[in-house]
Image (spheres, rainbow, N blue to C red):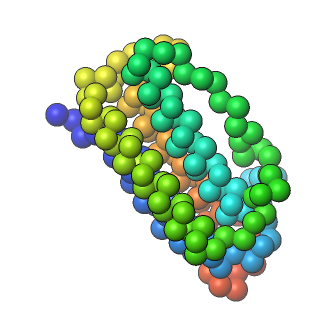
Amino acid sequence: MTDNPAQLVADAVDHCLDVASTWIAWNGHPIVTDGDNLWTPAKAVRRIQDHLIDHLAEVEALLAGAEPLSSAWHGRMVTLDADWARFTELDLAEARSRWTRLAQTYVNRYGTAPESWDTPRTPNWTLREIAAHVAGITWYADQVGRIQFGDSAGIR
């Protein structure tokens, strides 16, 4: 049997948590990427969680034979007031708890339906394609990047 494609999601969560473990050193200044994308640790956390939840709901709908709900997330193009919050040790602990549970849910859910991983679901992606897409959450963590005490915000 092929390896569970959702392991890509679990591995991506591990990467995000590794990077996020440095964010308690964030100095409160925004990080600007690609010329105009503004990032803070809280914004990256929001986007990672939104992405994990949105696509897990999509997987569940597809497996149930239902139409996935469209996403109403505002995405990375907006920065919410809450995105400016400090990132503390407790925020990291909360992210670790949420993200690892969500990753485990992906792995467990995919593990119950290996025969469905590559079933065409036009206009939606296959489950394997969804897992590969969700594994891209590392991009959000990498926009903030690893922060060391004394780092100043800058252009990445």
x and y, in percent, of residue 84 in the image = 78, 63
Q: Give the residue at the far left of this rendering.
A: 1
Q: Is residue 21 above or below residue 41?
A: below
Quadrant showing the N terminus: top left
Frontmost residue, 57 versus 116: 57
- Residue 5 visible, this orientation: no
What residue is at 72 percent from the left and 62 percent from the top?
40
Residue 130 image offset from top left, x and y in percent = 46, 32
Q: Is residue 26 left or right of residue 13?
A: right
Residue in the foreground of this view, choosing between 55 and 133: 55
Which quadrant would residue 26 be assigned to in this image?
bottom right
Q: Position of residue 16 (x, y in %)?
A: 51, 60
Residue 147's place in the image compared with 142, above or below, is below
Q: Which quadrant, please, contains the C terminus?
A: bottom right
Left/right of residue 84 with respect to residue 19 in the rendered view: right
Look at the picture and state if 81 lies above or below 25.
above
